[in-house]
Image (tube, rainbow, N blue to C red):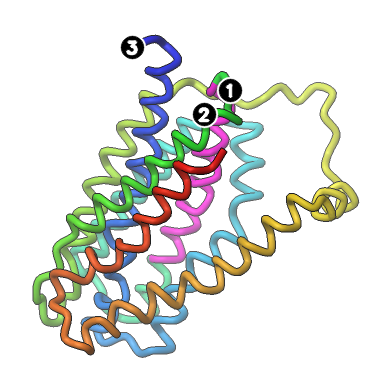
Amino acid sequence: MDAEAGLRSRLSGMMALVYAVQGAFWPLLSIHLVDLGVSERGRGWIFATMALASFAMPLGAGQLVDRLMPIQRFLTLCFGVGTGLLAVMAWGVSTHFGWLFALFLVYWLLMAPGYSLCASLAFRNLAEPGRDYGKVRLWGTVGWLVSAVMAWSGPQKGRGVAEAFWIAALLSGITALYCRTLPNTPPLPSGGRRSTSLGDVLELVRSPGVGVYLVLAFGVSLTTPFVYQVMPNYLRSIGMDRAWVASAMSLGQWPEVVMIAALP
């Protein structure tokens, strides 16, 4: 294996692990919260923590990493702390809505920037990112699939689906260690760069390609929460065994694998 192929393999492993962490517990989160007695409104707010964190943190985290530390070090820190938070959720230290909301909000404030920073790390290190990034990102969906199928959800009355969080915590710890082995990706030199203005952003948004992307991303972001918040409990209500819910929820990733592989 030449150096370029080896690098692609390392970055593909990074994507697989990063998305496997979320895939281990996200398809079962709704069932977990119902088992813990969280109300429908409370479940909605807990699912919203990912969106709230995604809105608040990427710019701040990007600025931090852009100036202060290598990307791989930031990812190691995020997944290391994330491992502890997932373990706390698995232990079921608290089942009160307020504590659960706070835990998930802190978790996503840490993790939301990680996905875009993984993409940045890959783009910075691939020799031809336009050609190779799709092949690397494909393994993120594969990782989600594998962990979602593996996540067992046997009956745990009053405890929720703690096993899924233990699997996620284990995968998160492995990811933190793996990130230490990634290529060093330090902050870019700041000399000669000017700050981005609102006008620059609006000009970019007016670009046809970016505009189409934003419309599609908005549609996906509208529909995905409904799927993961509503569908697991719907499947349970029509008689599907708990142990099969995670596998059923992973069916949507199979066409995603095919479509990503087919993209030019």
Residue under numbered circle 1: 128
Q: Is residue 254 above or below residue 73?
A: below
Q: Could you tell which of marks 2 and 3 lies nearer the N-terminus?
A: 3
Classed neighbour count for the residue bearing mark 1: other residues with Cα under 10 Å, few (<14), some (14–19), many (≥20): few
Task: Report which quarter residue 14 is drawn in.
Answer: top left
SS state under label 3: loop
What amino acid is labelled 2 in the image?
Asp
What amino acid is labelled 3 in the image?
Met
Residue furthest to the right: 199
**CB under 8 Å between callouts 1 and 2?**
yes
- Residue 206 is situated, as x and y percent measured from the top left of the image, at 84, 55
Residue under numbered circle 2: 132
Relative horizontal placement of residue 4, taking residue 203 as reference (left or right)? left
Q: Which residues are magenta?
A: 104-126
The residue that appears at 31% across and 46% down in the rendered structure is 143
Could you give the CA–CA distance between mark 3 and mark 1, rounded to whole angstroms? 17 Å
What amino acid is labelled 1 in the image?
Glu
